[in-house]
């Protein structure tokens, strides 16, 4: 069945039995392919019937379909003719793990940050109305993404504008990356867990049609009866029609509800209750994240093919150990406890752990409030997601000089998740924030030491580290490192490589190559990007003929800081920055992407050769 589906139109000619068979094939196909490439498994297993129903009722791309976050769009990709691209899913030059405008006219947006779909969809709907463009606009948003503040800002304006061509599908599986938390989740759970809601609501609607109010008193009686028997949802109170919940694995029921929603001339929320990982036992049984995002795994068991220690694991152990010594330490995550290494902390210190949902702005200002009252908040967050709370970082934390520790996981080039997940901007945007200290460990031991340093300071600190594995966990506790102190790992005569974070190891490999060619190159571990070591000006910039900076960040970060520090002394001409380009980078292996931009051992060695004017050619 799957082989015959080249476009959504092909779905509309299938019988119910054929559609059921297609759903089974899609699940088997996803498990097989994702077990080889890695990717987002359980979110896509949960939306098979929903996606089939959506594309049978609406006519993409005439009808605009906007996927929030986009990690649940694999089924959408399959039914829009991209089946054969799944062998290269998330691989260099292959199929993206998110909607991608360059892949298909069926993909409208490719930003994988959550809670944006309603704003996109409202803008598209309003523009279509003004320009007379036919077709509906459908936003698919999860209950996890619905916890984000942007979603409520959009709902507020949807309530005001009431576009007649907008349908909102709430894909409610009770989880984002992990179980959804907060009052909204509880509200949806009450609806989701009562299967009588839609049946009773329809019956009440029919009965109320028989009431023909002749005057205002009768109208009030009608509304009072309706509220008594059919309590309003939060959407109803905003004037947005609500329908559901419906079983998210009953394709026909979803289709029926979507068709009714399409006929309604006004914004409608269709509440679809799905099961994350549906149809694949290991995903449903998983207690942590139900195999949300996975590396390659054994499809029979669901177990990963390799289990290695990661930077996130090291941070998790370090913050747990620190919490035992610092009773005021609290940890905050934005719906990503497992992926940031905080699961053990959450189990052992439940009263000191806060999952705020997909609400990065709130997380940062919440941390500010905690710090104002004497606690020591540690905010564990992906580098790319801290961008969403930039204003709060400046105005709510840094302005008040509050002791909040920001731990930026997945800094630099992250790999298969692509342009919206690469954490390549943090050094540039953090460096301009007053009162904020910034550091980048070169190895696992430094990560633990810098965390201890950060917890001893009286102002905000950001610690960034990459995605990837580490050889081993250091023995804890470790001694803190002095603020602003760099380490000259290797002394040279001709040039020095000033490297940040993961680039220190690469710089050492480059220095080995240069040494074999007769070029004496020093290596400096510039673990503090702000403040910088005073010896840069007093020693290294004087002693070395050339300084080459290396960072897995866009220009404007560490290299720019070195230039600015040396320019007043007339020494900026000695500096040759090597950084990532002013561009959004594609998905692919981090090593390949870094090498393409001169951030591997040979690339850095070449930069030094050119800078010192060596005529010696590499062997």
Image: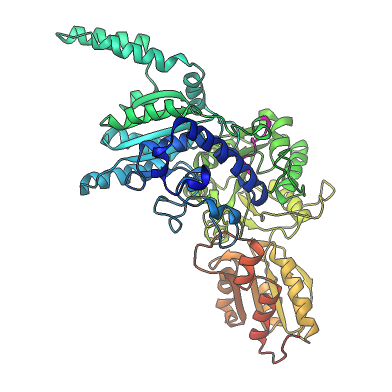
In this rendering, the count of numbered labels is: 0
Q: In which quarter of the image is the C terminus?
A: bottom right
Residue positioned 76% across, 71% down in the render: 508
Residue positioned 36% across, 36% down in the render: 57
Above or below residue 554? Residue 321 is above
Q: Nearer the viewer, residue 234 or 476?
A: 234
Q: Which quarter of the picture shows residue 554? A: bottom right
Q: Which quarter of the picture shows residue 58? A: top left
The residue range painted magenta reads 285-293
Q: Residue furthest right?
A: 475
Main secondary structure found in the magenta portion: loop
Q: Nearer the viewer, residue 282 or 607?
A: 282
Residue 413 seen in this snapshot:
yes
Q: Is 476 left, or right, of 145 in this rendering?
A: right
Q: Which quarter of the picture shows residue 486? A: bottom right
Q: How is the image coloured?
A: rainbow
Q: Is 266 left, or right, of 297 in this rendering?
A: left
Residue 143 seen in this snapshot:
no
**Is residue 269 shown in magenta?**
no
Q: Which of 254 and 569 is in front in this view?
A: 254
Q: Residue furthest bottom?
A: 615
Q: Position of residue 347 (x, y in %)?
A: 72, 30
Above or below residue 280? Residue 390 is below
Q: Is 594 left, or right, of 520 in this rendering?
A: left
Q: Position of residue 474 (x, y in %)?
A: 83, 51
Above or below residue 500? Residue 613 is below
Q: Position of residue 617 (x, y in %)?
A: 71, 89
Q: Position of residue 495 (x, y in %)?
A: 71, 81
**Is residue 289 shown in magenta?**
yes
Q: Which of 374 and 179 is in front in this view?
A: 179
């Amino acid at each position: 069945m799957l082989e015959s589906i080249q476009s959504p139109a092909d779905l509309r000619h299938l019988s119910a039995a054929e559609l059921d068979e297609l759903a089974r094939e899609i699940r088997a196909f996803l498990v097989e392919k994702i077990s080889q490439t890695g990717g987002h498994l359980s979110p896509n297993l949960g939306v098979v019937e929903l996606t089939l129903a959506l594309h049978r009722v609406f006519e993409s791309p005439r009808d605009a379909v906007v996927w929030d976050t986009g990690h649940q769009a694999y089924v959408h990709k399959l039914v829009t003719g991209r089946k054969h691209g799944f062998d290269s899913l998330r691989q260099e030059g292959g199929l993206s793990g998110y909607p991608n405008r360059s892949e298909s006219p069926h993909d409208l947006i490719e930003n994988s940050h959550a809670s944006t779909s309603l704003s996109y969809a409202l803008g598209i709907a309003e523009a279509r109305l003004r320009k007379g463009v036919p077709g509906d606009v459908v936003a698919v948003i999860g209950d996890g993404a619905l916890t984000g503040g942007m979603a409520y800002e959009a709902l507020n304006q949807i309530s005001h504008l009431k576009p007649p061509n907008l349908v909102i599908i709430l894909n409610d599986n009770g989880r984002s990356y992990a179980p959804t938390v907060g009052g909204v989740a509880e509200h949806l759970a009450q609806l989701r867990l009562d299967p009588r809601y839609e049946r009773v609501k329809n019956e009440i609607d029919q009965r109320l049609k028989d009431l023909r109010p002749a005057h205002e008193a009768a109208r009030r009686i009608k509304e009072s009866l309706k509220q008594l028997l059919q309590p309003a949802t939060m959407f109803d109170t905003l004037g947005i029609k609500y329908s559901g919940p419906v079983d998210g694995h009953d394709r026909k029921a979803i289709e029926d509800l979507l068709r009714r929603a399409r006929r309604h001339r006004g914004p409608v929320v269709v509440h679809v209750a799905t099961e994350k990982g549906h149809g694949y036992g290991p995903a449903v049984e998983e207690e942590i994240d139900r195999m949300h995002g996975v590396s390659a795994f054994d499809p029979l068991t669901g177990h990963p093919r390799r289990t290695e220690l990661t930077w996130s694991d090291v941070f998790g152990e370090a913050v747990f150990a620190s919490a035992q010594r610092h009773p005021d330490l609290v940890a905050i995550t934005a719906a990503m406890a497992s992926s940031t290494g905080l699961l053990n902390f959450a189990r052992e210190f439940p009263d000191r752990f806060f999952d705020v949902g997909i609400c990065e702005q709130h997380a940062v200002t919440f941390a500010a409030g905690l710090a104002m009252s004497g606690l020591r908040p540690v905010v564990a967050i992906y580098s790319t997601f801290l961008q969403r709370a930039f204003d709060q970082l400046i105005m709510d934390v840094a302005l008040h000089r509050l002791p909040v520790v920001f731990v930026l996981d997945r800094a630099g080039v992250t790999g298969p998740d692509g342009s919206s997940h690469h954490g390549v901007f943090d050094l540039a945007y953090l460096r301009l924030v007053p009162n904020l200290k910034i550091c980048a460990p070169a190895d696992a031991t430094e990560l633990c030491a810098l965390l201890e340093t950060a917890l001893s300071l009286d102002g905000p600190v950001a610690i960034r580290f990459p995605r990837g594995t580490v050889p081993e966990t250091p023995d804890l506790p470790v001694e803190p490192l002095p603020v602003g102190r760099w380490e000259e790992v290797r002394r040279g005569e001709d040039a020095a490589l000033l490297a940040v974070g993961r680039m220190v190891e690469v710089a050492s490999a480059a220095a080995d190559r240069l040494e074999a060619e007769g070029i004496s190159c020093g290596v400096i571990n510039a673990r503090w990007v702000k403040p910088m070591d005073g010896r840069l000006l007093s020693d290294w910039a004087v002693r070395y003929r050339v300084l080459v900076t290396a960072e897995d960040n866009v220009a404007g970060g560490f290299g720019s800081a070195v230039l600015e520090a040396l320019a007043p002394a007339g020494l900026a001409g000695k500096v040759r920055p090597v950084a990532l380009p002013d561009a959004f980078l594609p998905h692919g292996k981090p090593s390949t992407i870094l090498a393409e931009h001169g951030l591997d051992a040979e690339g850095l060695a070449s930069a030094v050769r050119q800078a010192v004017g060596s005529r010696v050619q590499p062997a």
